[in-house]
Amino acid sequence: MSLRSKDLLGMKGLAPEDVELILETAAGFKDVLGRDIKKVPALRGRTAVNLFYEPSTRTRTSFELAAKRLSTDVINISTSTSSVVKGETLQDTARTVQALGADFIILRHSCSGAAHFLAKNLDASVVNAGDGTNEHPTQALLDLFTIQEKKGGIRGLEVAIVGDILHSRVAKSNIYALKTMGARIRLIGPPALVPSYMKELGVSIFSDMKTGLKGADVVMMLRIQIERQGKGFFPSTVEYFRNWGLTAKRLAQADKDSIVMHPGPMNRGVEIASDVADGPRSVIMEQVTNGLAVRMAVLYLLSGVRA
Amino acid sequence: MSKELLDKTDIDRIITRMAHEIIERNKGIVSLCLVGIQRGGVHIAKRLSSMLETIEGKSIPVGTLDIALYRDDINVRKEQPVVRRTKIDCDIDNKRVVLVDDVLYTGRSIRAAMDAIMDLGRPSAVQLAVLVDRGHRELPIKADFVGKNVPTSKDETVKVQLEEEGGEDKVVLE
């Protein structure tokens, strides 16, 4: 079994069968990660390049470890120490990397569509590790995997996504992915960050936490980018927490078996209270572990299309 | 053109005989563990284990092993093999592990299975039980317990059909 495309660029347009295949395969890899020897020879002799034009710890480390667990060699290129500072274009850098024998190029870039652009111009498999405010598909896949594991399925669940939806590629990938898999979505946040035209995505929109969270099965928090403070989206982080921060009291509105998710890095006391982040309903650390299994599955399945 | 090689009665008898052979070779079932290779070997391993339990009066651990990630053709195939569950509940260190598969052919699956099992622990011995040995080995591998030896040509296929997957028990040469 393989995916239909050589690249993973976004959740938009990914068929439900492909999503299911990735999730099933990831379950097999999660087994591998529980063993003493956490490495399998499946992709021996392949090369993956992490090409990161934006800072990242968890995504880059997760992809690096995922590739290593599959016996694939990994090279990390962070642009601040590469010839990008000498003015090399994205395409030239990527083609150079491909000429060195890369089978996978894992790209994070601040421009939306950067991964799509590379995918069209390269033979290597391109995995989008976040492009601007567009998509971050592996984050959505690991979120789906975690939801499925905790709730036994995705179809019919009420999922609340809270925070800066407008600038969040995590939110967008999750909206597409959750729609594909049959969940119902509510977006909650300050009106400036949750514009009403997003209703066109087939979601409901709330500006009030209390009504928005009522009966939710999954509460997905997003990081508030502190650098956006003072740009008119919301008054201050203190104010933000007062209105949209996830506290134990607000969480009580959600279903009693609901789970709390966060893609990290967290701003404690801005979008989420510490006691909730570390509380019994939080699955935040499990998301990190599942991310590894999901990324292994993605690399494994994409390598089938290449050959 | 298809020819039935084994029917339900034959398969039942083979399982009974192989169970006895396993007990005889290992002088009982102490520190023995059966591991079925996904997918064909899984049901056969379960049947062998319940037969061993009937004969010896005590239960024996049985697990499943997925070899997709250890295959040697992973870089030449167009489609990646489906990754299935590996589930072995007992600690295999210092155990005698009996690998179980439905059909032994080139031996490449068994090579992969041996590598996979070694990554899970260090068994004191690994043995191999197969329902059908159809020849054409490409690696120096030989089964310890064979249900039936069947001479085949390379363009034939041996199909093992078991009740657990729906349908009736039979082995057919096509």
Image (cartoon, rainbow, N blue to C red):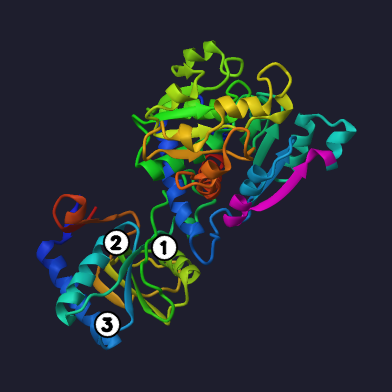
Say whether residue A266 is left or right of residue A151.
Answer: right
Mark 3: amino acid = Ile
Residue, disc 3: B29
- The residue sitting at 59% across, 27% down in the picture is A242
Marks 3 & 1, CB-CB < 8 Å contact: no
Q: The C terminus of chain A appears in which quarter of the rendering? A: top right
Circle on res. B109:
1
Mark 2 element type: helix
Residue B72 in view of the camera: no
Residue type of the residue flagged with mark 2: Val
Q: Residues within 10 Å of mark 1 (few under 14, many from 20)?
A: some
Chain part drawn in magenta: A65-80
Q: Amino acid at mark 1?
A: Ser
Q: Marks 1 and 2: CB-CB under 8 Å?
A: no
Front residue of A231/B18: it is A231
* Same subunit: marks 3 and 2: yes
User: Subunit of mark 3?
Assistant: B
Q: Position of residue A74 (x, y in %)?
A: 68, 51
Task: Report crowding for label 2: few under 14, some 14 to 19, many 20 or more residues within 10 A (C-alpha).
Answer: many
The percent coordinates of residue A255 (x first, y second) are 37, 34
Q: Is residue A154 above or below residue B53?
A: above
Q: Quick check: is A76 in the magenta stretch? A: yes
Residue B10 shown left or right of residue A192 in the figure: left
User: Which quadrant of the structure image shows residue A39?
Assistant: bottom right
The residue that mark 2 highlights is B42
Badge 1 element = helix
- From the image, state whether disc 3 or disc 2 is nearer to you: 3
Structural crowding at the residue carrying mark 3, measured as other residues with C-alpha within 10 Å and reported as few (<14), some (14–19) or many (≥20): some
Q: Residue furthest top?
A: A197
First of labels 3, 2 by sequence position: 3
Residue in the picture at 76% in, 43% down: A77
